[in-house]
Image: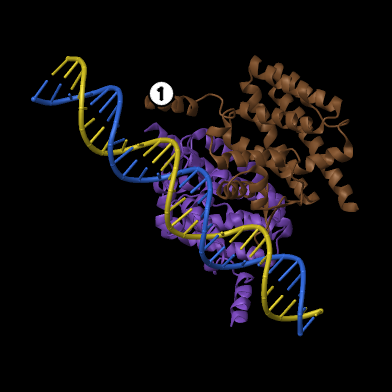
Chain colours: A brown, B purple, C blue, D yellow
Amino acid sequence: MTQDTANVAKLVSFAAYPEMISAELPAHEKVYREMRDLLLFGELAPGQAVTIQGICDSLGAGMTPVREAIRRLTAEGALEFLGNRRVVVPVLTVSRVNELIFARQAIEPQLVVRATERATDSTIEELTRIDDALDLAIAQGDVRTYLEQNYRFHARLYSMAEAPILSSLADGLWLRFGPSLRVVCGRVGTQNLPDQHHEALSAMRAGDAQGAAKAMREDVIQGMEQVRRALAEATRD
Amino acid sequence: MTQDTANVAKLVSFAAYPEMISAELPAHEKVYREMRDLLLFGELAPGQAVTIQGICDSLGAGMTPVREAIRRLTAEGALEFLGNRRVVVPVLTVSRVNELIFARQAIEPQLVVRATERATDSTIEELTRIDDALDLAIAQGDVRTYLEQNYRFHARLYSMAEAPILSSLADGLWLRFGPSLRVVCGRVGTQNLPDQHHEALSAMRAGDAQGAAKAMREDVIQGMEQVRRALAEATRD
DNA sequence: CATGAAATAATTTGATCATATTCTGGGCGC
DNA sequence: GCGCCCAGAATATGATCAAATTATTTCATG
């Protein structure tokens, strides 16, 4: 009996589906991921204040895990620490978007090159499925799903590149512009959103790493340009 | 009396020397900075286990601030979270150094360009003083001071660039290779350490942003190559 | 009888919470 | 309009619970 429960615990903790057993991973990790999604998919708007107790209430978590999640996110630049002890979702400026454009176009193509070199039929198939879901979301004007699938597409590319440091850098940048993407979509609509994914995928199928990198660089720059434009407009008001 | 202490607190908290009044900034911030220095200057070796309670004892801090500092550092890649709940200083592999080389040579020259465009006589003078201290440390074989001044030189360049996002990216990379730098110095000695700082400084004085960027790119690559070589040797054993 | 593997006990360490303390910001009176 | 006070929020501590590693013991086997 004790033996059985011990074995079960072992099994669960070593299970191959880490995100399915949400109860088994530590609370601070759970809170971190939830807040991350909130930020990435525009649930938390730029400029919005983030209070510890507010998160405690809305996520039903204790204080310590929330504090740790907030520290992690501030370390990643996803949240901003005002000199006093207030925490807010940072507001993007044009100058910061320019930095993000530079960083993404410097790092992301390299990840795509590596991903292409390591691509297999099954991973390309996987990317294609994500991109299909993305196209569907655009057609249906479903902003939330678009944001999710778009991020998933890029994130999957990162993981394919097998470059943990570059991946974490690229991934971290999403947290910085994620909250503003929703705003952009609100202004532009889901119609003419950038999507060079098809070109990138064809290149990857052909094993053309440089071509794939070029397509994704285009995608990145187009996407970030939209953010820049929307921001410039909003600032003009 | 209460009024006086309140005013003093105000004064202190707004003082222009944030690092001198260590008592006034929050404990988690203090712990974070101390651990950061420990990592950057080789006090914590790669592979070494980091226990919360160990840090509590050695820094004389409470548990919560230490936990938060560790979360921040893991978020920055300075510490690594093993699947079980152990935390260690990550061990660099050749593959990871290659990523670091790519990232640094992609980002750092851009920062130098921006720093050069914004340089004034006084900031260049400041950099020169740091570089002098650096040269002295090399001549004296003082590894610790070399590491400190070398980091200070680059960090000052970052802050001159007025690009918070790119700066935080570049700064974060130091935490990843910092612990290994001490090891490199142990093997190579302080003699033939890379130092293109003079070239960079001359270019900056001449307002030659591209020249300065080129020199610093050289410096970065040379430095990281040393790490790579030392690592390859150590792996061969 | 000695050695080694497996199971169990014990210690160490991490995660979480409840609580006390300190500080910030806004409201109220002067 | 200025300064003081108070509510509320954040920081920090210590205690408690849970998990994991290490040490120990036991048993089987050569």
A140 horizontally vs B58: left or right: right
Compared to B118, does A225 lie above or below? Answer: above
Residue, x 66% and y 27% (percent of image)?
Answer: A156
- Judging depth in this view, the residue of B161 and A93 nearest the camera is A93
x and y percent of residue D22 in the render? Answer: 31, 38
x and y percent of residue A133 in the render? Answer: 77, 23
A3 horizontally vs B41: left or right: left
Tell me if residue B124 can be seen: yes
**Which quadrant would residue B48 be assigned to in this image?**
top left
A181 horizontally vs B25: left or right: right
x and y percent of residue A97 in the render? Answer: 77, 46
Q: Which residue is mark 1?
A: A4
Compared to C24, does D27 lie above or below? Answer: above
Residue, x 79% and y 40% (percent of image)?
Answer: A181
Residue, x 58% and y 37% (percent of image)?
Answer: A165
B53 horizontally vs A89: left or right: left
- Regarding mark 1 in the picture, which secondary structure is present there? helix
- Judging depth in this view, the residue of A71 and A63 nearest the camera is A63
Which amino acid does the dot numbered 1 rest on? Answer: Asp
x and y percent of residue B165 in the render? Answer: 69, 49
Tell me if residue B219 can be seen: no
- Quadrant including the N terminus of chain A: top left
